[in-house]
Image (cartoon, grey):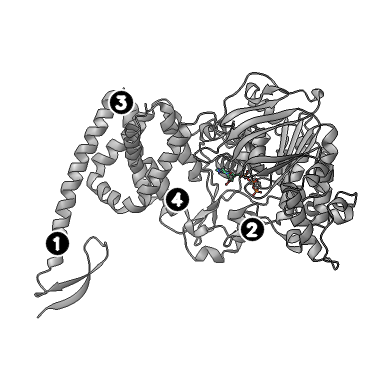
Amino acid sequence: MLLEEIAVNRSGRGRHIKRVSNPRMDYSDAFFTIVDIFNLYEGAFRLLSELSYILHIVRKFPLDPFFLAMSIMQNIIQSYSRNYFTPYRQGYIAFSANKAYRRMLAFFNVAHGENFEIDIKSDGSGKYILDEFVKNREAIGDDFTGDVFDRQISDVPLAILIGKEIFSLSHSAIERTISLLSIRDSNMIKCFEMIETIYDDCDFKRDTDDGDIPYLPIDDGPNRSGMKIEFRYPGTKKNALSNLSFTINPGQLVAIVGVNGSGKSSITNLFNRLYDPTEGEIFVDDIPIRSYKVDDIRSSMAILRQNHFIYPLTLRENIAIGMPGKEVTEHDFDVALEKGGAKDFIEKLPKKLDEELFPVETIHGSPTTEYQEMKELSSVFENEQSRGISGGESQRLAASRTFMRLQSGLVRFLAADEPSSALDPEGEFELFSRLMEQRREMTIVLVTHRFGHITKHADLILCMKDGVLIEAGTHDELLSKGEEYYRLHNVQAQAFDKDDTSGSHVDENSASEEDSASEESFYTPEEQCAPVCSEPSRVCEGNPCTPEYSSGLDVHFNIEYSTLNTGLFGTLALASVRSHPLPNIEFYELRAYSDASFGVGLDHVIYPTEKAGRVTALRYCSTSAVTPAIDKLF
Ligand SMILES: Nc1ncnc2c1ncn2[C@@H]1O[C@H](COP(=O)(O)OP(=O)(O)OP(=O)(O)O)[C@@H](O)[C@H]1O
């Protein structure tokens, strides 16, 4: 009779139902023996092929035997410490209270966060971010790494890398092969993705071709701009802007209007060379913009956008970064906060300007339930907790950063792309009034959906449709034409009018009268209150303020570890596939990245079952972990 039972397979890989006719004969044993033999052969085959590949590489590069030996030793130590070193074997929470480390991490995140790219380019804050990163890295003791491998890796990276590989192959090739198979679906894919990213970063080239004509002095007054261009976003087939031609005279106030997707923001993206036109030329003071030094051109402009992101720094620094690298006085802050409209809400925050809305998260840990009950951790959780602000407050913060920038004495051109979509009517009115006050000193371009206060005072209105400039002129001129601008204006006026008891159609001529009260009332209640999510990932989705402790170091570590070790084969393979010359810098980057994102620098470790402990784990984080990311932004 058949006996049915559930057994755990020998290698612990899972439960299997096995059917045996004789309890003494175990067919699953036979099956797993065959599997093991197969694995053995596969492991041996991998060992041979991988070894031959390594030897091939070794022959190509002269390797110092000392470093090779040291590399092998490091692997042995690493391998054993992983098994016996306490943090990897019990639940714990680790975090850093080290100011320099936290700032270093913040600037690392800023440099690598795609969200900040446009702001960094526009503000010209790349150098400041890099300098601050380096300063704080040095403050945590970068001058001595305490790790000969890190120290030498820039000189003989291949020795270390290949040493690691040789060791792991000779030490336990079959075991490694099996573990490789078991992580193939998850970690290996992540490893390759990370390696791709690293290579992409190493491949960086300056986004924008630089010119050689300086462009600085504000004494020359507001600038004259113009463009005669076609523009297509990279990787797209359709023109975002077609046959676009206009000139803005010095000191003019220009309003750009049009329906969604008509190309308004695309124009502002071209002004400071976030993109270059596909065809044609942009002129600044009658000289092609590409001839000027990019940094100078960007310094001479302030661009206030509808979407911006708050840096993981204090509010003080978030505003001061508008004038990067300059000494900022309390008076400068007062002016910026007052004009940007952020003063009142910042006053109400517990730490005022020293508040960090999105602090860097250094907390890592393995998922145990005990630590959740530990009182001493609550203040740590609280310190690293994000604090949301409203969309309107966020826009006020961005406006204050722009007004800080305007105090640099360099700005000759100001563009604002719907900077008030989340502001209340009063806030919007004040913001536009303050922006327009700058008119004497700089040329101003405002993108807006609102007809009235701005459009009526604009020297020039550009009305866009489907990427084409279909009308240009003043408010009165365009209304009297009775075409697209007239239509858009009327739609908005009617929306207001519907709520009016008269219910009558708005008279075009009366719309152009100096009746600011009715002009400023063109808001639906929804428009007045519509929040804007400036931090989609953190403010609007899910449970944004709860750091994900459960995705602790175990997972994190595995990925990083794999990148460094098992992933190195991927690196070599990828390198050969892509015909990379394998210069030192690439491997240097690999290690630097791993270190930087690994969370080294944690200076506290708390075990649920023991007292709070303190470890000194401040370690090396290479400058080049950030340099390529920043360089890409220039
Ligand atoms: N980064 C981008 N990559 C590719 N296409 C883009 C990109 N940004 C905008 N576009 C496309 O370019 C066109 C013009 O977009 P743009 O953002 O300039 O319009 P807009 O008038 O500012 O719209 P809105 O009023 O909604 O802000 C649209 O078709 C849009 O889909």
Outermost residue to the top: 212
- Residue in the picture at 73% in, 52% down: 487
Q: Is residue 227 left or right of residue 585?
A: right
Q: Secondary structure at mark 4?
A: helix
Q: Amino acid at mark 4?
A: His
In the image, which is nearer the foreground, mark 1 or mark 2?
1
x, y percentage for residue 619?
Answer: 51, 39
Q: Secondary structure at mark 3?
A: helix
Q: Are marks 1 and 3 in contact (CB under 8 Å)?
A: no
**Mark 3 sits on what residue?**
65
Q: Quadrant of the C terminus?
A: top right
Q: Answer with the quarter of the image where residue 426 lies.
A: bottom right
The label shown at residue 575 is none
Give the Cα distance between marks 4 and 2: 22 Å
How crowded pointer 3 is (Cα within 10 Å; few <14, some 14-19, many 20+) is rated as few
**Mark 1 sits on what residue?**
31
Give the Cα distance between marks 1 and 2: 54 Å
**Mark 4 sits on what residue?**
556
Give the Cα distance between marks 4 and 1: 35 Å
Q: Is residue 360 depicted above or below 196 in this figure?
A: below
**Mark 2 sits on what residue?**
382
- Residue in the picture at 83% in, 50% down: 429
Give the Cα distance between marks 1 and 3: 45 Å
Outermost residue to the right: 514
Q: Amino acid at mark 3?
A: Pro
Q: Nearest the camera: 610 or 30?
A: 30
